[in-house]
Amino acid sequence: METLYINLWIAFKNEDTLNLHGNTVYHAMKNPSQIHQEIQQGVIDRVHQNYSKMLQPFVAMLHRQQIRANYLTALAFMSALLGAFFLFRNHPLFIVFMLLHLVLDILDGSLARLEGGTRFGSWFDYLSDRTVSIVLLFVLLANTRTTEISSASLLFIPSTALILLALGMKILHHLLYIASKRRSPVVYSRSILVIALIFGADLVGVILVIVLSSLGLLSQLIAFFRKKKK
């Protein structure tokens, strides 16, 4: 998943270096603006590789049938929108559509790598996934008065304020990423939000989005000042 590397960072935060898979050393203390990207590349790519191996026969079949990765990206996006529609209407259906979304998301990435990928496909996948996160947060915001999340709070901060904060920070983080032509540090939170919502931990998902977006913004700020010093 997109944020598995966070656990590794917490586990090794007191170490000067971090070795993953025996082939890469991460200088956590020396390169704070790059630590999340480096661990993400090591861990998440490994997870994707494991899933890709499991799904390789199916992906190869899709490729032979000339089904393009962009088709799966579109299906994944539509599945997520249907899931968002059922979030507070029918939770079992929400789970079905969101799991389908996650599976299709893995498949489109594997198929894109097999095809060689395109600039359009890369942007389409990125923007659709980010839109899913924002739509889910808006659905949470729209239902704060009619669901159990309305009574939730953190340190006397109402859930509505937390959702608005998560939305604002996430949008700002990714606008800065887009403005940098996708060269600045970026932290994704869609998968962790989806998993939290599947298990009914709505407020936990919102807080994790805030934490991850904060990490992303901090990394972008550090990267900006490091670039200015050069």
Image (spheres, rainbow, N blue to C red):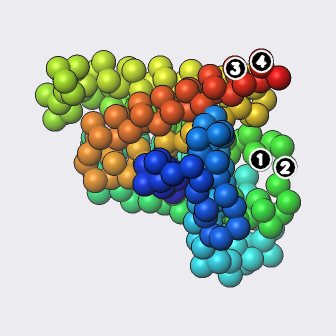
**Residue neighbourhood size for the residue with mark 3, other residues' Cα within 10 Å, grouped as few (<14), some (14–19), many (≥20):** few
Front one among 106 and 21: 21
Residue 49's place in the image compared with 84, above or below, is below
Which percent across, then down, holds residue 161? 30, 18
Task: Tell whether label 1 touches label 3 (CB within 8 Å).
Answer: no
Which numbered disc flags the more N-terminal residue, 4 or 2? 2
Residue that mark 1 sits on: 121
Task: Tell whether label 1 touches label 2 (CB within 8 Å).
Answer: yes
Instruction: Identify which amino acid the numbered label 1 is placed on.
Output: Gly
Residue 24's place in the image compared with 81, above or below, is below
Q: How many marks?
A: 4
Tell me if I can see residue 173 in this picture: yes
Question: Callout 3: helix, strand or loop?
Answer: helix
Image disc number at residue 225: 3
Task: Tell whether label 3 touches label 4 (CB within 8 Å).
Answer: yes
Tell me if I can see residue 90 in this picture: no
Mark 1 vs mark 4: in front: 4
Residue that mark 4 sits on: 228
**Residue neighbourhood size for the residue with mark 4, other residues' Cα within 10 Å, grouped as few (<14), some (14–19), many (≥20):** few
Residue that mark 2 sits on: 118
Q: Is residue 39 left or right of residue 117?
A: left
